[in-house]
Amino acid sequence: MKALKGYLQRALAAADSLSGKRFNLLVGSSLVATAAIVASTLTGAGDNGALAALLGQRPVGAAVSAPPAKPSAPAASGGPAASSASGPVAASGPLVAAESPAAAPSSRPASPQSKPAAPTETLPEAGRIKHVFVISLASSGYDAAFGATPQMPYLAGTLRPEGELLSGYSLLEEAALPNQIAAISGQPPNDQTKENCPTFSDFPVSAGLDSKGAVEGAGCLYPVEALTLADQLTAGRFKWRGYMEGMVDEAGKPDNCVHPESDGTDEPPLGGYATRNNPFVYFHSLLDLGDCALNDVPLDRLDADLRKIDSTPNYALISPSLCNAGVIGQCPDGTPDGAASADAFLSQWVPKIQSSPAYEKDGLLIVTFGELNPPDPAAGAAAPTGKPKVGALLLSRFVSPGATDAASYDPYSLLRTIEDLFGLDHLGLADGAKVKSLAPGLLGETRGD
């Protein structure tokens, strides 16, 4: 019950800071997660009274007040949060009684005809691609992956002829975290993410959102107002999952949504799981409202989820361990390292994905790179200038085998493409006028600039 109180208290605090469209999206995205947490806790503990008491901490009058008539007026404190809390607990009689105020005296009975009609919910719709898998690796450079003498023979020799090469795909930064963050939220790099956030710290309290929804200033833990692709998908009733290789708790047991404590240091084990490759743990919208705890899982879960279409998420981000991602110097001595280890990971998991019912029916697999290994001075490699070019590969029955697209793409393009495939709005800098989407071609439409 203590854990449930923590979730609900954070949910109410989060909802207090939001209004309008962002609040509606956040409530929709957290509804399933919060309902599951409530149901699980009540089933196990049977303690309705404690939950009712927690919900009773909220001002009842504010909880049921109508929204202001003018959109520009600030929302009354507590109004939106009660909406998020009331959804998942509505099935329990005692909880509803605790949440609802006593009926006001009336001189005449209420007329059934006076009750306003419930608004019709309009959900986004996916096109012909309904399952997207993204595998994010570390790059040793474009030539190492797709050049004349590649260091990744499975990627370049087996998969490349089956798919469409994005030869102009580049990273925003060499570090992993800014690219991972941008690819799920459209948030730009900042001084802390460029260093892979060695300290798991919040943005300053004063940090706000600019006109594009980008959080101003520098920080690692994004405020609840900063939404993600995962929030959008859950609000749209799509399923998502992050599959993280080697994600374990302090006791070494597989666990969900693992990250340092607030203001703690991130010290990944050699070759193991690193939070910098798990962007979902950096967003309060996912941490505070339960979605990360439910959907950010160890990679071992992927095998079972792939067996049936119904158990396969619509969007899956697959993140290998530091060794298997291809980060140089992260594998045990005497074993393949860098590009070779990343290629071996692909050869293990890509066939499993491609043979799954969901992929065969309407799937898209994107093999991309989320960070750049330092150049090898011994090989005469020079440090890159500008955005590092790494390339990416699309695999699907909806792409032309052996095709090449030389247009400029980056992590914002990746986010925008996935949003377009599922009929979602564009978050953050993915909404930029110059950001290209791959969705028109994937959906069988004419691709424009």
Image: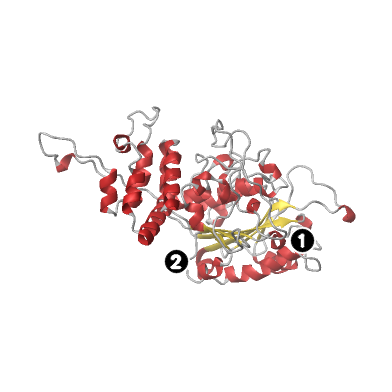
Q: Nearer the viewer, mark 2 or mark 1?
A: 1
Residue 440, x across and y down, in percent: 55, 52
- Name the residue: 78% across, 67% down: 336
Q: In the rendered view, tell whether residue 380 sits above or below residue 149.
A: above
Nearest the viewer among 417 and 399 is: 417
| SS at mark 2 in the image | loop
Among the two numbered marks 2 and 1 on one chain, the one whose residue lies closer to the N terminus: 2
Dot 1 corresponds to which residue?
338
Q: Is residue 43 left or right of residue 422?
A: left
Q: Is residue 435 left or right of residue 7?
A: right
The span from disc 2 to disc 1 (Cα, nearest Å) is 35 Å
Residue 130, x across and y down, in percent: 49, 60
Q: Quadrant of residue 205?
A: top right
The quadrant of the picture occupied by the C terminus is top right
Q: Quadrant of residue 296?
A: bottom right
Mark 1: amino acid: Gly
